[in-house]
Image (spheres, helix red, strand yellow):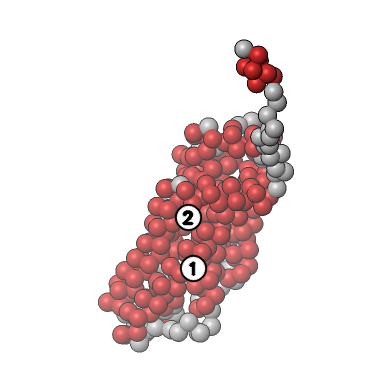
Amino acid sequence: MTTRTQDQGRVPATVPAYPRPQKVTQARVLRSEWTKLRTQPSVRWALLSAVILVIGFGVGYSLLRAARPPRGAAAAAFDPASVSLAGVQLAQIAAGVLGVLLITSEYATGLIRATFTAVPRRLPILWGKAATLAAATAAVSLPAALAAFVAGQAILRRHHLAVPLSHPGVARAVLGSALYLAVAGLLGLGLGALLRSTAGGISALFGLLFAVPIAVGFLPGTWPADAGKFLPAPAGQAVTTAAPDPASSLPPWAGFGLFCAYAAAVLGLAAIRMRRGDA
């Protein structure tokens, strides 16, 4: 009895030591967001869809143009690089939807509350998601764009329509395709964080990229050409073409810069709402 009493009052020689709470830094938030990104099945499917669309549609469109080669004046304006990279216009859907889902899925499941508890300042979460999303999209899109270009030019070469990668503007178009898809993903992320709704974010994304250019196309006179090139999608897609038309397109890097400004504006509005609003 005495021994049991002494054992109960005895203090263990070693007390388990628990680490102190670590300081929340942007680097740690980046690692956390990278873990979320690479473990979500929807991310893998969206990136795979983007790759398939870039390569598959690029090859298919190259086969179509090879079957109907341009003649006369149309041959002089023919842009073989743009033909091979035509799938980028469809892949922007996958990239943008991925951006929307990356943030709205957390709001839908309530995981965002735990995330905000771990990172009370909130904005590092948005910047972490943006950085990991842009890096992953660009890393996947660049090889896809290069593969689409090589395959497409191999098809067009049979009709003496191909251009080498060293041709002026071609390497920039291949790189620009990957950059365009990365910023399209950021635009979707901003819309998703701003609206906090998967359906709303995807609808807004389709509206900005597709519905607005269609609506502008119904304007009278030269308005479609004059105003259309300043819209998000046409402005950004200028960097994906080797020889953009000055009459209907901005200079490549100027257009891409404007597209980045659209994405930055949406992300800025999303940051304001994320900082001031509740979960």
Q: Quadrant of residue 262?
A: bottom right
Using the image, determine if residue 4 lies above or below residue 63. above
Closer to the camera in the image, 154 or 248: 154
Q: Which residue is mark 2?
A: 95
The disc labelled 1 sits on which kind of residue? Leu
Q: Residue at x 65, y 49 (%)?
A: 28
Viewer-nearest of discs 1 and 2: 1
- Residue 11 rendering spot, x and y as whole percentages: 70, 26
In the displayed structure, does residue 10 sit left or right of residue 55? right
Closer to the camera in the image, 247 or 30: 30
Q: Which residue is mark 1?
A: 142
Q: Quadrant of the N terminus?
A: top right
Of labels 1 and 2, earlier in sequence is 2
Q: The residue tagged with tag 1: helix, strand or loop?
A: helix
- Residue 62 rendering spot, x and y as whole percentages: 34, 73
* Crowd class of label 1 (few under 14; some 14 to 19; many from 20; radius 10 Å): many
Q: Quadrant of the C terminus?
A: top right
Residue 73 circle label: none
* Crowd class of label 2 (few under 14; some 14 to 19; many from 20; radius 10 Å): many
Single out the residue that lies furthest toward the bottom: 160
Single out the residue that lies furthest toward the front: 2
